[in-house]
Amino acid sequence: MTQRGGVVITGASGGIGRETALELGRRGYPVCVHYFKDRDSAEQTVNVLKDECKVDAFAFGGDIADENTAKMLIDQAAERFGTIYALVCIAGISPKNNGNRIFTEDTDPDQWDLVMRVNLRGMFLPCKYVIPLMKRQREGNIITMSSIVGRTGWSGPAGTHYAASKGAIINLTRTMAKELGPYGIRVNGVAPGWITTPLTQSISSAQTGAILEEIPLRRFGRPEDVAKSIAFLLSSDAGYITGVTLDINGGWYIG
Amino acid sequence: MRLEGKTALITGAGKGMGREFALLFARNGARLVVADINEENGKAVVEEIRALGGEAHFVYADVGNVESCRNLAQEAIRLLGHLDILVNNAGYIENLALEEITEQHWDRMMNVNLRSVFFLSQAVMGHMMERRSGRIINMASQAGKTGGLNTGAHYAVSKAGILCLMKSFAKKLSPYGITVNCISPGVADTDLSRSVPGIENIIKAIPIGRAAMPIEVAQAALFLASDEAGYITGECLDVNGGLLMD
């Protein structure tokens, strides 16, 4: 259990984000649950954190790719918790066409921009605003959310824009780790494979059946598989690990 | 107690990193076989674990000898009742220039560092496949990716080979619920690294600005051995302070 500041989790209202909030709450971290649209889910997560995990928690809604929103998120969490120990950037979108792939030539340029805006700018901005605080305290952790398709590219249901954004995030993680390591700030990421969450639910079972055969561990991932890895990377047990993007994919890609 | 009810076989556990793994695993509830070529060291670690209230057995093994690997696997399963975790840690470093490496140096390095990992993993895999459960953790090294900073090419190749073996075993064994992963340390704070000329310059290049404490490498192994890492397989976890990111 640690009480050296709270954790801010962007995109914490669903799937992996929610499970990560609960896992960290169980480990004693106060949590700020950021959400974009799903306020009810975020508030419900906050209630569980307070009632069952007995940690301080609050919800914060807004567009994480907006400068003022990102700055306010960091400022409010720092004020509420005293300081911020970790920023976990999970917010991201993966547009599809009714669960099917949007091919490159069919991709709307505005949708391309939106994906880059939410997935990249929406990760960069909270980092930008939390870094000075973490530098002052000479301690901090940042977790980024990539994906197996960020390593491999994919012509499956997730779009070209999504995969490209997730590839860039691996690179962003390394740059920030190199830059911030001397200040006691570790930056790591996770690259989940197929995790059963709202983001993957729209995909047909015919497609998912074919994928299962390619996964050596012969099961899809669960949000807790990712949440527990994030909790490890944030902990002092991982005190010498930085710049890593940890693959959590059941062996679907071994590179 | 993240390894409550689990059993582990750790090679080269009589000193250094292997000893750190053994103590940490024991503190987390695992029952152990401590394997080493040095009986005095191995038995001392067993006594340390027993003093903590844990269960451990020493088994002599020269992992450079395949028969010894097979005997070790059999003996570990017999002593512990079953085997959940294999940590292939035994190995050595040798710093020789390219022109200095002889066939003897090469063969010995491959036998002790690489061939051992293959045959010991092979010797336990049938047991783990029957149980449809297991963990194999191999000790790789940054040298296996870079070709070595202050180590001989033969050492680097042995570590590169371990990475490849991990992939082969991961693909074959994961359908049986067995995860196979590597840990790749960078510079760790040990007698060995402190004796390397120019080590201060290497450390300056590390974003975190220091060598690893052996316990930090052990914690990574504990994570991979635990249930928390149940969906991670075929992965090389770098524990290098940011020295290499690939």
Image: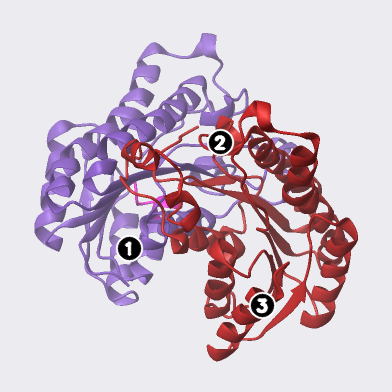
Residue type indicated by callout 3:
Glu
Q: Which residue is identified by label 1?
A: A44
Apparent side of residue B241 relative to residue A69 in the rendered image (left or right): right
Residue A18 falls within the magenta-colored stretch: yes
Q: CA distance from mark 2 to mark 1?
A: 30 Å
Work out whether A196 lies above or below B24: above
Apparent side of residue A216 relative to residue B78 in the rendered image (left or right): left
Q: Which residue is identified by label 2?
A: A148
Quarter location, residue B31: bottom right
Residue type indicated by callout 2:
Ile
**Chain ID for label 2?**
A
**Chain ID for label 1?**
A
- Residue at horizontal 67 percent and vertical 41 percent from the top: B163
Farthest residue toward the right?
B67
**What crowding class fits label 3: few (fewer than 14 Cα within 10 Å), some (14-19), or many (20 or more)?**
few
- Do circles 2 and 3 both sit on a common chain? no
**What crowding class fits label 2: few (fewer than 14 Cα within 10 Å), some (14-19), or many (20 or more)?**
many
The answer to whether residue A79 of the structure is visible from this angle is yes
Q: Nearer the observer, disc 2 or disc 1?
A: 2
- Do circles 2 and 1 both sit on a common chain? yes
Q: Which residue is identified by label 3?
A: B40
**Chain ID for label 3?**
B
